């Protein structure tokens, strides 16, 4: 049983952020490593704790759209998407509204800012108690799968944190959908808010540019376990771990992402099962074909990155 952090633990975590410390923060997508977005030293400490290249900017977390409007320039598209999906697993990349409110380092020097209002009650409580913008990249070390449980988050970056909040396992299990609303509306990172759901609100999305400056996160190898990953495999070879999807035999080293073929369940299990499969020290991790529809776009995006296909 998970015991939800009480008001005292939330207040202590907010104090840790004020003092320039890092805090492991649960969100509905994945665990984040949180810091005061206005404090360049704290932001630098996040990059250092993750071993993250400092040209890859961070998402700024806020309690609500009113706080977000002080940081990014909201047009009609941004208002409509925030209205429909916030709080929730959607990040909006917007032109910066107020120079200085978010440290330059958090934006990696870009003139845009990525904003998200998370839905997890513990994240919301921490953001309210802290009262300012908070950067929170996924709490993994750079290039590793995002942590979806408290234990995995503490294991990855806990040593660098001065506080940690246990919010239980993450319900979504994949990082937020990232949409840039600049001249064009572009999908920079697929996620659990699907392309179709976004297009239903603001119309067609352009393909993301192959421009590393505009879509920095797309260029790096990501989400990689230690074992090689092989995709679209119907049956594993000897010595391989297998991530199945849909009806499949049980067995040693077989993890079924969703026996009923449910994409939301598969998304929630993906990173934890990649980690578990990896811990079994297989010769490789074979993964069953996942349909490319709806949430499948985001799952396949993460799997291709885990397999080392990037770009
Ligand atoms: O679900 C999530 O978004 C999690 C939780 C903790 O909120 N956070 C997360 O953060 O995934 P991170 O830092 O691991 O991923 C941020 C992504 C990267 O792909 C980064 O390149 C992109 O957002 N990003 C951030 N700021 C950007 C900007 N100004 N322009 C374009 N992309 C940006
Ligand atoms: Mg990440």
Image: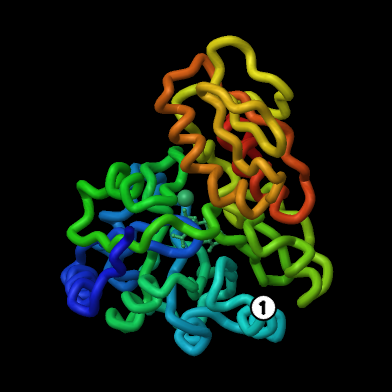
In this rendering, position of residue 299 left or right of residue 45: right
Q: Residue furthest bottom?
A: 66
In this rendering, position of residue 189 left or right of residue 9: right
Residue 306 picture location, percent across and down: 56, 34
For the point 51% across and 71% down, the residue is 116
Q: Nearer the viewer, residue 23 or 76?
A: 23
For the point 66% across and 41% down, the residue is 259
Vertical arrangement, residue 250 with respect to residue 117, above or below: above
Residue 290 picture location, percent across and down: 72, 39
Residue 288 picture location, percent across and down: 69, 31
Quadrant in the picture for residue 247: top right
Q: Is residue 228 visible?
A: no
Q: Residue furthest right?
A: 204
Residue 174 picture location, percent across and down: 55, 53
Q: Quadrant of the C terminus?
A: top right
Q: Which residue is mark 1?
A: 81
């Amino acid at each position: 049983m998970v015991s939800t952090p009480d008001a005292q633990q939330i207040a202590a975590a907010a104090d840790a952020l004020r003092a320039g410390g890092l805090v492991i923060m649960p969100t509905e997508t994945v665990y984040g490593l949180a810091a005061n977005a206005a404090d360049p030293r704290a932001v630098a400490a996040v990059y250092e704790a993750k071993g993250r290249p400092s040209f890859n900017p961070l998402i700024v977390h806020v309690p609500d759209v009113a706080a977000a409007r002080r940081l990014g320039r909201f047009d009609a598209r941004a208002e409509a998407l925030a209205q429909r999906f916030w709080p929730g697993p959607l990040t909006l990349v917007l032109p910066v509204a107020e120079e200085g409110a978010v440290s330059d380092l958090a934006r990696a020097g870009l003139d845009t800012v990525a904003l998200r209002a998370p839905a997890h009650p513990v994240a919301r409580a921490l953001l309210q108690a802290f009262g300012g913008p908070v950067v929170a990249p996924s709490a993994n070390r750079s290039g590793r799968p995002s942590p979806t449980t408290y234990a995995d988050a503490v294991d990855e970056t806990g040593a660098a944190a001065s506080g940690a909040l246990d919010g239980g396992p993450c319900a979504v299990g994949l990082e937020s959908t990232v949409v840039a609303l600049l001249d064009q509306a572009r999908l920079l990172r697929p996620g659990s808010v699907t392309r179709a759901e976004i297009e239903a609100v603001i119309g067609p999305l352009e393909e993301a540019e192959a421009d590393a400056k505009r879509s920095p996160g797309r260029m790096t190898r990501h989400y990689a376990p230690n074992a090689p990953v092989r995709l679209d495999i119907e049956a594993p070879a000897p010595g391989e771990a297998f991530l199945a999807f849909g009806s499949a035999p049980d067995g040693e080293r077989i993890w079924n992402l969703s026996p009923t073929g449910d994409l939301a369940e598969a998304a929630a299990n993906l990173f934890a099962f990649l980690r578990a499969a990896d811990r079994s020290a297989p010769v490789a991790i074979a993964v069953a074909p996942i349909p490319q529809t709806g949430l499948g776009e985001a799952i396949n995006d993460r799997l291709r990155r885990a397999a080392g296909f990037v770009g």
